[in-house]
Image (cartoon, rainbow, N blue to C red):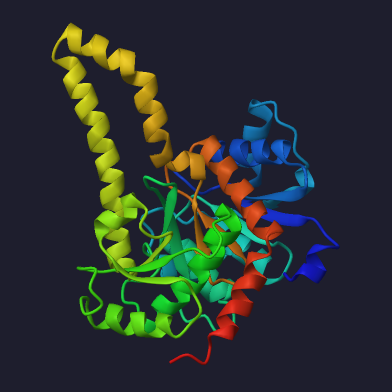
């Protein structure tokens, strides 16, 4: 939706009540919490109506029943994405995506099957004109603030042109959502020298240099946590491995702390004294704080969450979707992509 439309109406956010390992409980509670925190949007819950109503009633929540959209089928986590979209037309993911496609909603939020969300967004809602591939972005803390990484799994065989698009979309997202003016962009590679990289990264660097984006050049893996640049672009194959490795490191650190504490009472006391400090330090790595990840390049606002999302994570996903609407991200991406459409 463009600004002219946005000035006349409230943002309409659809939440997939059946998405996630703890659905509909966490999705319903988190979505309603978001609405009670920020009343400036209309919330719709899509999924099995009776199950949604039961969660509302058991938790003494108040919600307008007219805003519950019934969808009797559920796309499970192990369903094949494209097949599931065709074989389960009455699933919460398909019904939610259609609402955005038909302009009955502005944003769709789900902690359900990631592949199905990407497929529904691309095949049902459609990409912004000029966008060859949508991209999933992830947030990583660094020693100076945050680094955003695009792509972390929407596509596993990007072409140079797609990496240019990720740089354009990543710049807008990082600037608008995190307030980083003229964010610095780097291409993830195996060395800082311009001559290093594979065919795709080298060709993508050439394309990005033709824009007026703030291009730094090649960056290595360690630069992400050092904050050398604000936006890192890479193929989704590499990005997904990177992000999953990061999640694994966090779990490993937690295991090491527990293991150390279990070895003696003295160790337990030492860890106990530092516990709140550790929690505060590791908070930046906690996906719940940031909610989900944006799928950029789709003709609507899409936020995809972790399957194990808590109500807090769902709430933050909904609030992020609302913020993206307020900042008019879809129009800004469309305008920027058109601006660079002639670069080859």
Q: Position of residue 192 (x, y in %)?
A: 24, 68
Give the answer, above or below, for where 321 lies relative to 123: above
Give the answer, above or below, for where 163 lies relative to 130: above
Q: Position of residue 65 (x, y in %)?
A: 76, 43
Give the residue displayed 53% in from the left and 65% down from the top.
182
* Front residue (pair 118, 324): 324
Q: Residue furthest right?
A: 8
Query: Dividing the picture into quarters, in which one does residue 37 lie?
Result: top right
Query: Dividing the picture into quarters, in which one does residue 197 lie?
Result: bottom left
In the picture provided, is 5 more to the left or to the right than 152? right
* Front residue (pair 79, 274): 274
Q: Position of residue 2 (x, y in %)?
A: 74, 71
Give the residue displayed 42% in from the left and 34% down from the top.
283
Q: Position of residue 67 (x, y in %)?
A: 75, 49
Q: Quadrant of the N terminus?
A: bottom right
Query: Dividing the picture into quarters, in which one does residue 224 lie?
Result: bottom left
In the picture provided, is 163 more to the left or to the right than 12? left
Please count the marks in the image.
Answer: 0
Camera sees residue 90:
no
Q: Quadrant of the C terminus?
A: bottom left
Give the residue displayed 48% in from the left and 50% down from the top.
305
């Amino acid at each position: 939706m463009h600004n002219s439309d946005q000035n006349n109406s409230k943002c309409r956010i659809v939440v997939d009540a059946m998405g996630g390992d703890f659905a509909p409980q966490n999705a319903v509670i988190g979505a309603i919490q978001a609405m009670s925190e920020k009343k400036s949007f209309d919330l719709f819950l899509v999924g099995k109506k009776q199950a949604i109503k039961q969660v509302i009633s058991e938790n003494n929540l108040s919600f307008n029943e007219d805003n519950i959209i019934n969808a009797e089928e559920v796309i499970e986590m192990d369903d094949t994405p494209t097949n599931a979209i065709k074989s389960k037309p009455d699933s919460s993911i398909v019904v939610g995506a259609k609402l955005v496609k038909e302009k009955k909603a502005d944003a769709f939020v789900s902690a359900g099957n990631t592949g199905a969300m990407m497929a529904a967004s691309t095949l049902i809602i459609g990409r912004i004109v000029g966008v060859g591939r949508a991209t999933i972005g992830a947030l990583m803390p660094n020693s100076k603030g945050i680094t955003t990484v695009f792509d972390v799994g929407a596509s596993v065989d990007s072409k140079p042109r797609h990496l240019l698009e990720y740089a354009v979309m990543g710049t807008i997202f990082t600037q608008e959502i995190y307030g980083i003016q003229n964010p610095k962009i780097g291409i993830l590679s195996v060395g800082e020298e311009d001559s290093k990289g594979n065919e795709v990264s080298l060709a993508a660097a050439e394309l990005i240099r033709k824009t007026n984006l703030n291009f730094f050049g090649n960056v290595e893996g360690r630069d992400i946590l050092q904050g050398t640049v604000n936006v890192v672009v890479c193929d989704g194959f590499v990005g997904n491995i990177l992000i999953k490795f990061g999640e694994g490191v966090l779990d490993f650190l937690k295991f090491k702390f527990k293991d150390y504490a279990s070895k003696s009472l003295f160790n337990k006391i030492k860890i106990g004294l530092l516990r709140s400090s550790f929690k505060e330090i590791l908070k930046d790595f906690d996906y719940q704080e940031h909610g989900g990840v944006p799928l950029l390049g789709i003709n609507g606002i899409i936020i995809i969450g972790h399957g194990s999302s808590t109500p807090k994570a769902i709430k933050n996903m909904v609030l992020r979707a609302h913020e993206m609407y307020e900042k008019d991200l879809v129009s800004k991406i469309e305008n920027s992509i058109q601006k660079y459409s002639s670069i080859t």
